[in-house]
Image (cartoon, rainbow, N blue to C red):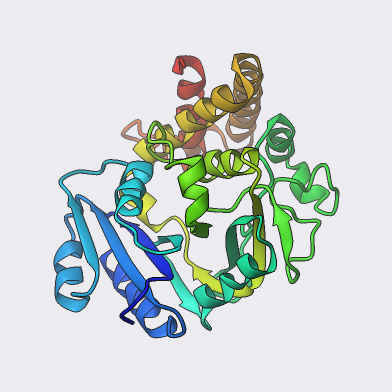
Amino acid sequence: MVEGQITLSIVIVNWNTLKLLYDCLQSVVSDTKLITFEIIVVDNGSTDGSPEMVKKEFPMVKLIENQSNVGYAKANNQGIRICSGSYVCLLNSDTLLLDNSLETLLQIFTEDEKAGAATSMLINPDGSVQIGSALGEPNLLYWIAVETGFYKRFPKSRVWGKPYLSYMDHNKTHEIEVCPSAAIVIKRAVIDSTGLLDENIFFGTIDWDYSLRMRKDGWKLYYYPHSRILHYGGQSKKPIKRELLYSDYKSRFYYFNKHYGSFQMNLFRILMIFSSLVKLSFFIFHFGLSKLIKEDGKISSENIKSHLIRLHTCFTYRP
């Protein structure tokens, strides 16, 4: 790590992703050569030896060890509070930096003084551009496009292609509405004015919420494809998918109520109930209950489980 005035603070939240975390940290150390930086790892009570690995293999890393999983927002805030850099990068542990990606990403801030945050082009392991590298604001129209599948049928439409901004040229720089939290660099001045992440969100809509808050404060958000980062995606969700799904669905209602009010939140609730019931009916009609339920009575389909959890959230969530 380079000594001196710190340009960039890199915060990585980890929960039981030892091998991915090792590879991520190795890529940060080997790929980031042109700027001064610090790395802060916040471990959320991992039981796979992650903290021990960090201490042994990366002694220069500042390590915060939580005794339990305190959530993604709170853990990131713990890291942000001890950052020294002029810029803060929130980086997922399931990423690999490519070709001086973070130094390159910082260039956007010199091109526009109102740039508050920026995200890289996210790359799949097969080299393709990852859907979700840049996002539109998740309002009601966004969710109608997602639930109906119109975003796939009409990807070039500026209305129906809004969720993943599929109508834009992903090889060019664009001002966007939401920077995905897999890899986002935020100007320190933005954090000072907008504040920390909302700790009421355990997991889920953190990037939606913070992006909207930054934009309301007058900052611009950018997608900068000259910077590329490999993102595996969803690796820390696997051990407790049910709990994380429930937290994710709850966070969507929280986001709607916080930013659009109770009326739109309840319209969103109706949309989710109707969509899940239609899709559950299709699964049952198409496959039959005998193929969806095992002999021990457990549900075999992940899609069925997901919609049942979503329906449960729809009927039980209260602001």
Residue drawn at the location 28% of the way across and 54% of the way down: 15
Residue 151 at x, y = what percent?
75, 46
On screen, residue 146 versus residue 180, left or right, reads right
Viewer-proximal residue among 137 and 299 = 137
Residue 243 at x, y = what percent?
35, 36
**In the rendered image, which quarter contains the N terminus?**
bottom left
* Image-quadrant location for residue 212: top right
Residue drawn at the location 19% of the way across and 50% of the way down: 45
On screen, residue 84 versus residue 268, left or right, reads left
Outermost residue, right side? 157
Q: Is residue 318 visible?
A: yes
Residue 186 at x, y = what percent?
51, 57
Residue drawn at the location 29% of the way across and 73% of the way down: 22
Viewer-proximal residue among 64 and 292 = 64
On screen, residue 103 versus residue 128, left or right, reads left
Q: Is residue 77 above or below residue 5?
A: above
On screen, residue 145 versus residue 288, left or right, reads right
Q: Is residue 290 visible?
A: no
